[in-house]
């Protein structure tokens, strides 16, 4: 009876998100990512261009009113200079007064290397353009052996985390991610959580791996492992807010309640995706 009384009848708050993707092409070749198209740098290579700024502007003008967060992300493109990405943030910020999570350390590192500009300067310009935080990137597991195996071209785990921490100095609080998929072992998750706990994060996002949407029959099993993952994250990162990124189609009301009970502070649900 007591357990029933403690059980929340309402889930934690749900935030409507608009996701802006600059390009669905990326040279990084992470083995699990559908953006991963190897793009050799040869002068006759046809690299598709990123989302035109005017397209972003016109789509944003029709944005649903319930938007609580805009996330800007991309594959990694060599085609556009940093000023394109800064202008995109500015375009978004000109029409939206809420939080704008712009790019992640992986993009900042690419601009730093390609344009030979200091990281702090790039972060300061994103902030000037209107960004309010750094995103957690796509499946950044901070376990070096996992990265070596599945995304061998990424910067090292400690370099990623250190770059993210610079966001605090500039006023772009960083976020990090935990992947919820059957393909991370318990010891992988423990190592990742230990790494996360060595740094400071504005919030943690739990990303439900896409296979859940493709295999709805696994949902019951997956929801339980998801609850366990959220609860383990809550135990390790006691004061850091945890948001669950909902898979396409969203989570059921009951699933949200279970996850809230396990320690989730909120849910991100995608209202609209703007892509090239
Ligand atoms: S860096 Fe990100 S977008 Fe690029 S292939 Fe890896 S996960 Fe995908």
Image (cartoon, rainbow, N blue to C red):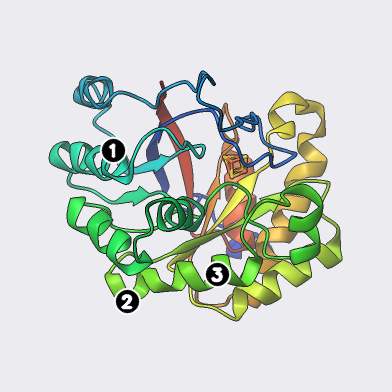
The percent position of residue 182, horizontal first and vertical second, equals 82, 46
Q: Mark 1: give few (<14), some (14-19) or many (20+) Cα within 10 Å.
A: some
Image vertical order of residue 114 relative to residue 220, above or below: below
Q: Residue at x 83, y 47 (%)?
A: 183
Between marks 1 and 3 in the image, the one whose residue lies nearer the viewer: 1
Q: Mark 3: give few (<14), some (14-19) or many (20+) Cα within 10 Å.
A: many
Where does label 1 land, which residue? 84
The percent position of residue 96, horizontal first and vertical second, equals 19, 40
Mark 2 CB in 8 Å range of ligand 1? no
150 and 228: which is toward the camera = 150
Q: Residue at x 27, y 27 (%)?
A: 64
Where does label 2 land, which residue? 169
Tell me if I can see residue 91 in this picture.
yes
Q: Residue at x 21, y 51 (%)?
A: 130
Q: Mark 2: give few (<14), some (14-19) or many (20+) Cα within 10 Å.
A: few
Q: Earlier in the sequence, mark 3 or mark 2?
A: 3
Where does label 3 land, which residue? 161
Q: Quadrant of ligand 1?
A: top right
The percent position of residue 17, horizontal first and vertical second, equals 39, 38
> What is the distance, in whole Å, between disc 1 and disc 2 at their CAs?
24 Å
Image vertical order of residue 33 relative to residue 5, above or below: above
Q: Earlier in the sequence, mark 1 or mark 3?
A: 1
* Left or right: 190 as drawn, with respect to 92: right
């Amino acid at each position: 009876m007591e357990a029933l009384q403690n059980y929340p009848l309402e889930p934690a708050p749900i935030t409507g998100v608009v996701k802006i993707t600059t390009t669905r092409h990326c040279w990084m070749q992470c083995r699990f990512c559908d953006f991963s198209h190897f793009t050799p740098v040869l002068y006759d290579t046809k690299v598709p261009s990123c989302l035109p700024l005017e397209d972003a502007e016109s789509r944003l003008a029709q944005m649903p009113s319930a938007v609580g967060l805009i996330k800007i992300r991309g594959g990694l493109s060599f085609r556009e200079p940093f000023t394109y990405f800064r202008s995109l943030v500015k375009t978004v910020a000109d029409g939206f007064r809420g939080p704008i999570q712009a790019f992640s350390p992986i993009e900042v590192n690419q601009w730093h290397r390609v344009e030979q500009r200091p990281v702090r300067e790039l972060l300061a310009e994103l902030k000037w353009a209107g960004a309010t935080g750094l995103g957690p990137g796509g499946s950044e597991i901070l376990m070096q052996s996992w990265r070596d195996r599945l995304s061998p071209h990424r910067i090292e785990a400690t370099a990623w985390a250190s770059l993210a921490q610079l966001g605090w100095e500039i006023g772009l609080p960083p976020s990090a991610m935990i992947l919820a998929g059957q393909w991370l072992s318990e010891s992988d998750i423990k190592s990742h959580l230990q790494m996360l706990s060595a740094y400071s994060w504005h919030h943690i996002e739990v990303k439900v791996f896409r296979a859940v949407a493709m295999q709805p029959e696994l949902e019951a099993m997956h929801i339980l492992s998801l609850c366990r993952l959220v609860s383990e994250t809550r135990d390790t990162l006691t004061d850091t807010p945890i948001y669950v990124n909902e898979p396409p189609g969203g989570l059921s009301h009951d699933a949200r309640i279970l996850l809230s009970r396990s320690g989730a502070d909120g849910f991100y649900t995608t209202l609209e995706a703007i892509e090239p």
